[in-house]
Image: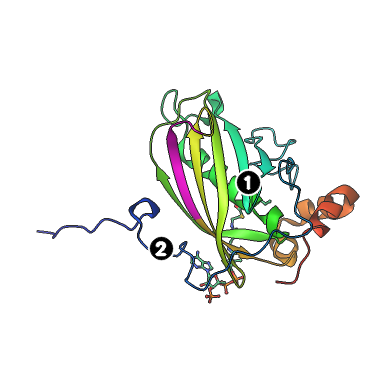
Amino acid sequence: MNGPIASPPTPSAGFLTPTTPPADAVLPPRAPEAPAPGSPLGSHYDQCFGCGPQHPQGLRMTTTAGEGLEVFAEFTVQDCHQGGPGLAHGGLLTTAMDETLGSLNWLLHAPAVTGRLETDFVCPVPVDSVLHIHAWITGVHGRKIYSAAEGRIGGPDGPLAIRAQALFIQVKLEHFTTHGRPEDIKKVLDDSDLMKRARAFEVNP
Ligand SMILES: CCCCCCCC(=O)SCCNC(=O)CCNC(=O)[C@H](O)C(C)(C)COP(=O)(O)OP(=O)(O)OC[C@H]1O[C@@H](n2cnc3c(N)ncnc32)[C@H](O)[C@@H]1OP(=O)(O)O
């Protein structure tokens, strides 16, 4: 007979996980180029499933810079986002959290990709709900950016539905040009507006 199975560590239970910043992580200042508090962040790529206005089935999320190292986003759950009848699919909720956590890149002015994302689903989210997501940086250690987020139903003080912790890793723009499908990379390179947006992020991590 098998023995008892230990519960997996979760952010909600306060366990240390790879998304917990180490003791010597820092909270850097906002980058001078970071969008002003209250300004909409716009889309980083018009075909992005999370924020792209041109993506036919995307989440079309809108995100706003907060005061410190934080952002606020909204995701309206639509019919096409169902998992159970009338309820949001958990994977799409995770995507919404990933997108919002990724938008913290704007505040540090450095491109970074998700290395690890941990999610707690606290309560079901009905279709037609607006999920209000608040994400913030919890620490930076070298190329590693630690962050956390909460999603609440109906308003910033609504019922807590989802919680996440993430580890993003700063990358050079070559990460995208080397690994992306060539025709999509070419489209970006050929579009001066998109290139301007990408260059705005260029750093040497
Ligand atoms: C505005 C933008 C919004 C964007 C929102 C959407 C964000 C996304 O969804 S991005 C897409 C999903 N993510 C990806 O495709 C990333 C795929 N993974 C990779 O490309 C690579 O594994 C990458 C870049 C994360 C790390 O590779 P690499 O640059 O070689 O770094 P590597 O040396 O392996 O790791 C760097 C450090 O991070 C740590 N690390 C990397 N991955 C993890 C992980 N999954 N868990 C824990 N630690 C990790 C390593 O242990 C290492 O730590 P240390 O410096 O202490 O030794």
Q: Indicate the amino acid at tag 1.
A: Val
Sequence-wise, the earlier of marks 2 and 1 is 2
Q: Position of residue 141 (x, y in %)?
A: 57, 71
Label 1 CB, ligand 1: below 8 Å? no
Q: Residue at x 62, y 70 (%)?
A: 143
Above or below, 147 against 130 in this view is below
Above or below, 114 against 59 in this view is below
In the image: residue 29, left or right of residue 81: right
Q: Position of residue 77 (x, y in %)?
A: 54, 29
Quadrant where the N terminus is found in the figure? bottom left
Provide the residue designation for mark 2.
Answer: 17
Q: Position of residue 171 (x, y in %)?
A: 67, 66
* Magenta-colored stretch includes residue 164: yes
Front-lying residue, 50 or 167: 167
Provide the residue designation for mark 1.
Answer: 71
Q: Secondary structure at mark 2?
A: loop
Q: Indicate the amino acid at tag 2.
A: Thr
Distance from disc 2 to disc 1, alpha carbons, whole Å, reads 23 Å
Above or below, 22 against 63 in this view is below
Q: Which quadrant does ligand 1 occupy?
A: bottom right
Which residues are the magenta region? Answer: 157-165
Dominant secondary structure of the residues highlighted in magenta in the image: strand
Q: Residue at x 75, y 71 (%)?
A: 204
Q: Residue at x 55, y 40 (%)?
A: 133
Q: Residue at x 90, y 51 (%)?
A: 192
Q: Position of residue 11 (x, y in %)?
A: 39, 54
Which residue is most to the left? 1
> Is the residue marked by circle 2 packed among few (<14), some (14-19), or many (20+) residues within 10 Å?
few
